[in-house]
Image (cartoon, rainbow, N blue to C red):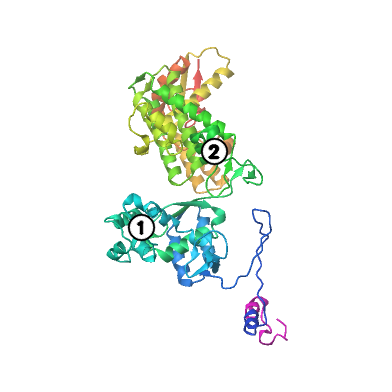
Amino acid sequence: MLSNCKEFAGMKVNQAKDLVAEKLRDLNLNVPIYELTGKVVCRCGTEAIAAILQNQWFLDYSNPEWKKLAKECVEDMKFNDESVRQQILNTIDWLKQWPCARLHGLGTSLPWQKEWVIESLSDSTIYMAFYTLAPYLQHPEDYGWNLNKKLEDDFFDLIFLKKSSKEEIKVKYNIPDGLIETMQEEFDYWYCFDYRNSAKDLIQNHLTFLIFNHVAIFPREKWPKCIYDINGYVKVGTQKMSKSKGNFKTLRDLLTAYGADVTRLTSLYAGEGLDDPTFELEFFDVAREKLLEINSLVNEIENLEYSEERTWVEEFAEERINQLISEITDALENFRYRTYVQKLYFEYVKIYYEYKRICESVGKKLNKQIVMNFSESLIKMMQPATPHLAEELWHIKHSNYVSLESWPEYEKLTGSGVFKYNLAMQLIEDIKNIKQLAKLEKINKITLIVAKTYKYEMFKEIKRMQDQEVTFNEMLKQIASKYGKYDQSIAKNFSKLIKSVPEILDKDLEMKSYEELKSFIAKIFDATVEIKDADVFDHQKSNLANPLKPAILVE
């Protein structure tokens, strides 16, 4: 500030501006000007203008004690993205006075100044509490209640806060015996609400007001617990869905064209988290075909011939079923609906086809317990997204409703079945490649040579050093000095070697797995199969075998 600015001379402008404004106000020399942060256009296309109204009413969100309670609530809440928590905390910090009433439009009259109407964002944030009482207040005659006078604060203080006298309220509003207790139980059952979904553009108003208003009115045990599934703007293809663009579909049109289940499934697949959900119209056809496929699959399952035999194939199927039930459950519990749809309707369904394909490849019947558990779990997990088809499929065998069934249970299994499956698929692919390269019409004998013991130890050393971020040159030096006497090609192939370290380095497990897979591989190729240990099997290819990558001889 310049020297002619009296007491503000020498101050930085950012320090002086508020002090100057305050002095000008005191001297009645200033005129307030309010500016919008940007151009605002009404839905009708008209540019919005901010009006300064006399005697306006405000909610004082600048109150420090109120802000403190709001922040305490936020700290204990659950969000699908931590950035949402921080955005709400930031909003709490900068919110000051919010105009809570207006002179026109729909709304509730301000009780002490009837010409003012309560602004929608100011009174719409605790309507969840009203929902718990709505049936009793909208249709009191259904409950034997002759409600003939306006309900005042004392009634709501009793139901929500248990502050008023129950007997006085009962007499004052002519409430039947037991109805007060019923309404209180209804409210206590639903509150506190533990899940609220909304849009990310409401973080800086509605959702933050919701927190402010709840902590102002309700006791701590009734505060919100979770704001989750915060979505962006819905897109159709790459464009924002908008009435002005004409790129929208009405719910009635979608239900007529595709039905409820297909519409629900497509909506859930649109997106998750803070990303703008994309409504993919072509997915309607994908969803319809997928539900038709599942319908055929479940009916097929009911008419198969089964066996009670259990091999590594059943072990694999059971592990995958349990693993995916766990992942699907986690996706639903954390409101990741697109992930839920992908994992249930696509990945989970593939388990049956893969299990069936493996069994058919060796002329083996499917295990009844495995397949029935797969089918029943599938139908139960479909119920939240596609309830109509789920009930139809459930009623093929059951007379009750699947919606009343408990969610499928699961456990974390050892993973040995999936391990053997991966070994088997890799072996089959490698043997087929060798057969093709050797231009063999028929393979009569397959010999699998399992790597020498020192290679498992060497790979463990490499893995340990990788975890410790040892440099390439130091790793090469240590491995070459320790294992070079066994393998002269280490230095030459080291860069390739350190990229092929398997997760599982257990020679005994690998040997036992090949023994268990031997009959399966034999049936696939109609050949005899032998398992050899490179430590004792004297062959030139023995040195080429690596952990989880046996050398293969074919005759």
Q: Earlier in the sequence, mark 2 or mark 1?
A: 1
Whole-percent x and y of residue 339?
Answer: 50, 40
Alpha carbon of mark 2 to alpha carbon of mark 1: how far?
A: 37 Å
Q: Residue furthest top?
A: 441
Q: Is residue 357 above or below residue 242?
A: above
Whole-percent x and y of residue 181?
Answer: 29, 56
Q: Is residue 109 above or below residue 257?
A: below
Residue closer to the observer: 511 or 152: 152
Residue 281 in the figure: left or right of residue 464: right
Q: Is residue 474 above or below residue 258?
A: below
Residue under the point 48% across and 72% down: 64
User: Looking at the rendered structure, which numbered label has been put on residue 147?
Assistant: 1
User: Looking at the rendered structure, which numbered label has been put on residue 252?
Assistant: 2
Q: Amino acid at mark 1?
A: Leu
Residue closer to the observer: 505 or 39: 39
Residue closer to the observer: 465 or 520: 520
